Amino acid sequence: MPLPMVVGVDGSESSLRAVDWAADEAALHELPLRIVHAYRWDRYEGGSLAREFDEPSRRVTPDDILVVAGRRARRHHPDLAVTTEAVAEEPEYVLLREARDASAVILGTRGRGELADLLLGSVSLTVATTANCPVVVVRGSHDNRAVEGRHGRVVVGVAAAPTAAAVHFATEEARRRGAALDAVRAWRCPTHDTADQPLLAGTPERVHEERAAEELRAVLVDTPADVRLHRLTVEGPARRVLLNASYGADLLVVGRRRPGQFGHRLGRVAHTLLHHSACPVAVVPDTA
């Protein structure tokens, strides 16, 4: 039995946008969609849901949240298999438990009002840091749709650490969407390389760039021929390079290390992108 896409909703507009995106994603992958509401979330904003019922003063209940979310999921995909459940637990626990049997977990930013695309809630951050499946945080001033993206482009950040799972995820996303795949490897030349040997100025940069290009080629050697692949090596901090790339992407994919001796940790690059990316961000845990 295929693992479902799971989307968490709390009644906020950002979570309803995540439902729209998740419905597209589930349809793309021909998977069922499971909508989960943990009703010990911080008090939700009921205005968006009340408008769905055409009753601005209506008192919004957990059942209302699921009804509206299910309706939105089927808006563009009437044949999509959708299940819903409300659970009386803290959302982090609920969503991490759901992640054990999910192909991916989709979440909103949980921002409020005009800051909806600027703030990342603690629930989304915790799940992205800890879940054992890919987690997508739906960010950016997009049209809430995973299909028919404005840019026709999926970007994956390729780091020096193993990122095979992230590359595989991004490749599959690009293939199913018919989008181009931009594999980006940021590189930097340490200042001490030239400071100690002034006569070699200019050479170290080329060495570091060629090394980054070779790492990129090695990671992408098995990319299917039907994927339009662009290999990009860009000088600069990875956070800045990938943040800039997000403005021309429909989805940005980054890897996450498996838990080590210090427990679950989210790298600075992924942390920055989850808070500031201009498009949805997928955080994919390393499987090695």
Image (cartoon, helix red, strand yellow):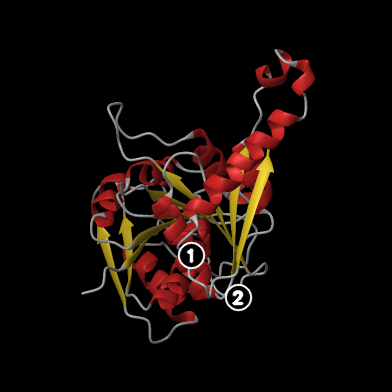
Q: Amino acid at mark 1?
A: Thr
Percent of width and height locating residue 20: 49, 69
Query: In screen coordinates, is 144 left or right of 99?
Result: right
Corner quadrant of residue 195? top right
Q: Quadrant of the N terminus?
A: bottom left
Q: Earlier in the sequence, mark 2 or mark 1?
A: 2
CA neighbours of label 1 inside 10 A, class few (<14), some (14 to 19), many (20+): some
User: What residue is rendered at 54% in x and 71% in y?
Assistant: 227
- The reply, left or right, for residue 162 in relation to residue 233 is left
Q: In this rendered view, identify the residue nearer to me: 5 or 29.
A: 29
Residue occupying the point 33% across, 35% down = 264
| Inter-mark Cα distance, 2 to 1 | 23 Å
Residue occupying image coordinates x 24% and y 55%: 100
Q: Which residue is mark 1?
A: 223
Q: Relative to residue 278, is residue 178 depicted above or below?
A: below
- Vertical relation: 253 (above or below) 215: below
Of 206 and 244, nearer the camera is 206
Asked whether residue 276 is in view, the answer is no
Q: Residue furthest top?
A: 196
Mark 2 closeness class: few <14, some 14–19, many ≥20 residues within 10 Å: few
Foreground tag (2 vs 1): 1
Residue furthest to the left in view is 1
Q: Secondary structure at mark 2?
A: loop
Up/down of 32 relative to 230, above or below = below
Pointers 2 and 1 in contact (CB under 8 A)?
A: no
**Which amino acid, mark 2?**
Glu
Number of the label disc, if any, that sits on residue 245: none
Instruction: Specify the label residue 148 is tagged with.
Output: 2
Farthest bottom residue in view: 79
Q: Nearer the viewer, residue 140 or 236?
A: 236
**Number of numbered markers:** 2
Q: Which residue is farthest front? A: 199
